[in-house]
């Protein structure tokens, strides 16, 4: 018994020293509540580095036959390790992102003065989904055709299926090289905008950054510092971003050589998969499961897309929603018992109705075909709308 208590006390001492090290030495500018966010920054930096390495592995070598290139990629050059490092980095960032978001919701950080940083963080979280969707389309695995299916379906639905508006990105209804090349270029350059959003999120939330005032204070109120350094740092980041875009546009317009684009990832595809994209035989990766769940329980096509968009909108604008509710509903101390019972009853019916959900997604086809196609579940639609109405009542 004494040995057990000594072990617990010793563990407490170790944790206290670890807390001191993280809070004072590693993160002198922030409080201990930002440790998960700091881990997320480290994971993002490692992901960028692994992306650079993976891009260098994809430099074309016309002198090598396919078999020799594949052998060198897997054995000699550690190509498989770099590839899986980049893939596992996505999992790490998503795990830390969800932990970071859930922790901030639990701590109710959306009711503080850092609402601008919260909105930037929510927008960056949406942008990360966009980047990962582009990357999965290039991974040449069984997830690629599914992700491409959902992205193309959403894109064309936003334009109300008007003629061939999908041509800008997808060119046609089949997987093709032009389509993959455009997604590859988007995937290479959009992460820099994501890093810019993350930088603004950190400056607004964890630095109490304000360029209009003469000085700012640390989050733990231990001292103050002059904000000119961070203003200059932001200016350097903006200048670097402008230079990157200028160089990209210049070489794209004047020195683009189509033969330098590498098509190495196409070598993993099966020829039967190139003719038409499959959908029903695969399922998305785990971090797209929440979006897939929304699409599954939504009875109609556009209703599912609406709730997917509202998922990010409600998360991003949570401070504004809370302030609006807190301002206009202070006169209601508690939820009336009658409304509470109605909401509970509607929630139970909604959970029971999930067992009757159709097994096909409303975005099930690459391009939605209305004739004899998806009709939906009117009963589920009624219960779902009734539940959402009572939630916001």
Image (tube, rainbow, N blue to C red):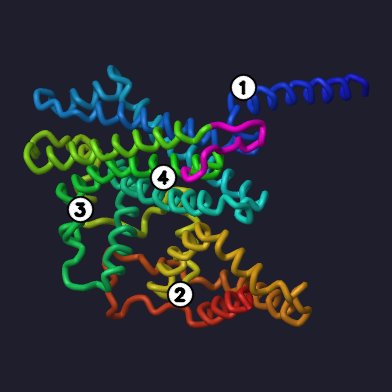
Numbered mark located on residue 175 in the image: 3
Secondary structure predominantly adopted by residues drawn in magenta: loop
- Work out how far the residue at label 1 is from the one at label 2, CA to CA, in angstroms: 53 Å
Mark in front: 4 vs 2: 4
- Work out how far the residue at label 4 is from the one at label 2, CA to CA, in angstroms: 35 Å
Q: In which quarter of the image is the N terminus?
A: top right
Numbered mark located on residue 299 in the image: 2
Is 123 drawn above or below residue 357 in the view shown?
Answer: above
Residue segment shown in magenta: 211-225
Determine the residue located farthest toward the right in the rendered image: 1
Give percent across and percent down for residue 84: 39, 31
Q: Name the residue under label 1.
A: 25
- Work out how far the residue at label 3 is from the one at label 4, CA to CA, in angstroms: 32 Å
Q: Name the residue under label 4.
A: 197
Work out whether mark 2 precedes mark 3 in sequence or the reverse, and give the earlier one. 3
Give percent across and percent down for residue 192: 33, 40
Identify which residue is drawn at 18% across, 23% down.
Answer: 68
Does the segment drawn in magenta span residue 140? no
Determine the residue located farthest toward the top in the rendered image: 76
Identify which residue is drawn at 64% across, 74% down.
Answer: 328
Identify which residue is drawn at 72% across, 80% down.
Answer: 339
- Work out how far the residue at label 3 is from the one at label 1, CA to CA, in angstroms: 51 Å
Work out whether mark 1 precedes mark 2 in sequence or the reverse, and give the earlier one. 1
Is 307 drawn above or below residue 291 in the view shown?
Answer: below
């Amino acid at each position: 018994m004494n040995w057990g208590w000594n072990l617990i006390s010793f563990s407490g001492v170790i944790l206290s020293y670890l807390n001191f090290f993280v809070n004072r030495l590693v993160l002198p500018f922030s409080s201990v509540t930002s440790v998960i966010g700091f881990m997320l920054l480290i994971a993002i930096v490692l992901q960028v580095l692994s992306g650079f390495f993976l891009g260098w592995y994809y430099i074309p070598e016309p002198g090598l036959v396919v078999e020799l290139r594949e052998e060198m990629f897997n054995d000699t050059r550690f190509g498989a390790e770099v590839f899986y490092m980049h893939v596992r980095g996505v999992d790490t960032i998503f795990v830390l992102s969800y932990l970071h978001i859930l922790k901030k919701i639990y701590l109710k950080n959306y009711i503080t003065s850092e609402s601008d940083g919260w909105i930037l963080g929510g927008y960056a979280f949406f942008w990360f989904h966009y980047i990962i969707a582009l990357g999965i389309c290039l991974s040449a695995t069984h997830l690629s055709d599914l992700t491409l299916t959902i992205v193309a379906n959403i894109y064309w639905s936003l334009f109300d299926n008007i003629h061939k508006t999908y041509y800008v990105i997808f060119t046609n209804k089949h997987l093709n090289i032009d389509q993959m090349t455009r997604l590859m270029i988007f995937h290479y350059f959009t992460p820099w905008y994501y890093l810019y959003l993350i930088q603004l999120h950190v400056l607004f939330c964890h630095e109490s950054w304000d360029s209009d005032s003469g000085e700012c204070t640390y989050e733990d109120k231990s001292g103050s510092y002059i904000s000119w350094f961070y203003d200059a740092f932001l200016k350097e980041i903006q200048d670097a971003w402008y230079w990157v875009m200028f160089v990209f546009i210049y070489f794209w317009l004047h020195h683009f050589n189509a033969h330098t684009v590498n098509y190495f990832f196409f070598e993993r595809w099966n020829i039967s998969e190139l003719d038409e994209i499959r959908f029903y035989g695969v399922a998305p990766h785990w971090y797209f499961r929440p979006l897939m769940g929304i699409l599954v329980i939504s009875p109609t096509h556009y209703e599912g897309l609406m709730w997917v968009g509202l998922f990010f909108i409600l998360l991003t604008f949570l401070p504004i929603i809370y302030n609006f509710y807190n301002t206009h509903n202070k006169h209601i101390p508690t939820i009336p018992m009658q409304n509470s019972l109605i909401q509970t009853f509607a929630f139970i019916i909604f959970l029971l109705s999930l067992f009757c959900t159709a097994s096909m997604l409303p975005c099930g086809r690459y391009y939605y075909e209305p004739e004899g196609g998806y009709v939906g579940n009117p009963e589920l639609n009624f219960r779902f709308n009734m539940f959402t109405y009572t939630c916001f009542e």
